[in-house]
Image (tube, helix red, strand yellow):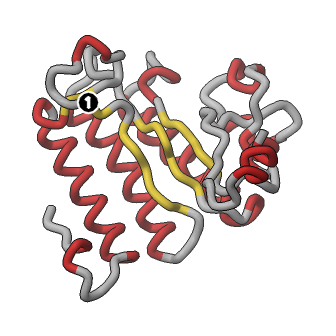
Amino acid sequence: MAAYIKSLDRKHLITVGTEGFYGPGRGERLGVNPGDWAASVCSDFIQNSAVKDIDFASVHAYPDSWLPKASMEEKVKYLSVWVDSHLNDSEYVLRKPVLFTEVGYLQHAEANSTVDGDTLIQVVYDRLYDSAKKLQAGSGALIWQLMVEGMQMYHDDFSMVARDRPSTYKLMKEQSCRLQSLYGKEGDPTWQCSP
């Protein structure tokens, strides 16, 4: 499919859009998956992303959903390994940029607070920023699912309205400014950033 899209539009950026699980036959990388079940979903991060016409790798991060019984400390530790593994594979195996296209935390879970969710998002943001700062594969992260007010009827358990989560929104703006400072165009007023 990627080759077909490229035949129509060479400038169209294409990615796979899966969670980023490692499939059977990936040896020690299987230990990075959130559980044995992840290798059986017929998806493999490296194999899928290595396709010639795939422009950048994409990964999701849902530690609340994947590790529902884990403590916050365990989720942070797991997420750090998850992000680092995909950054390293994107840099050294795939030689492609990687974008964490869905990063989310449960908004309606009693066990979670916004502080916990912000901690998880910060783990992803910091590791991606460190990679980008070294001009490596880390390219960015998108919150799943950012909504505008009045759209709550379309929400899922990970949806958030920025106004309802000001600390998370602040993290998003700060990360945008950090990345902008690396890639921004000097002298272009549209690239000014204020967290």
119 vs 102, left or right, is left
Q: Is residue 56 above or below residue 147?
A: below
Please say if 139 is above or below 168.
Answer: below
For the view shown, which residue lies furthest in the right direction? 25
Q: Residue at x 21, y 42 (%)?
A: 168
Left or right placement of residue 175 versus residue 17 in this view: left
Query: Residue, x 26% and y 82% (percent of image)?
Result: 188
Q: Residue 49: horizontal and vertical position, in percent?
A: 73, 48
Q: How many marks?
A: 1
Q: Amino acid at mark 1?
A: Met
Image coordinates of residue 37 in percent, x first then y, are 70, 18
Q: Which residue is mark 1?
A: 147
Q: Report the front residue among 50 and 74.
A: 50
Which quarter of the image is occupied by the N terminus?
top right
**Picture coordinates of residue 125 (x, y %)?**
38, 54
Q: Secondary structure at mark 1?
A: strand
Q: Residue at x 81, y 50 (%)?
A: 51
Q: Quadrant of the C terminus?
A: bottom left
Q: Looking at the picture, does residue 127 appear above or below residue 142?
A: below
Residue found 28% across the figure and 15% down from its top: 109
Q: Can you tell which quarter of the image residue 48 is in?
A: top right
Left or right? Give the position of 108 relative to 2. Answer: left
Q: Position of residue 95 (x, y in %)?
A: 72, 65
Task: Please tell me which residue lies in front, 34 or 135.
Answer: 135
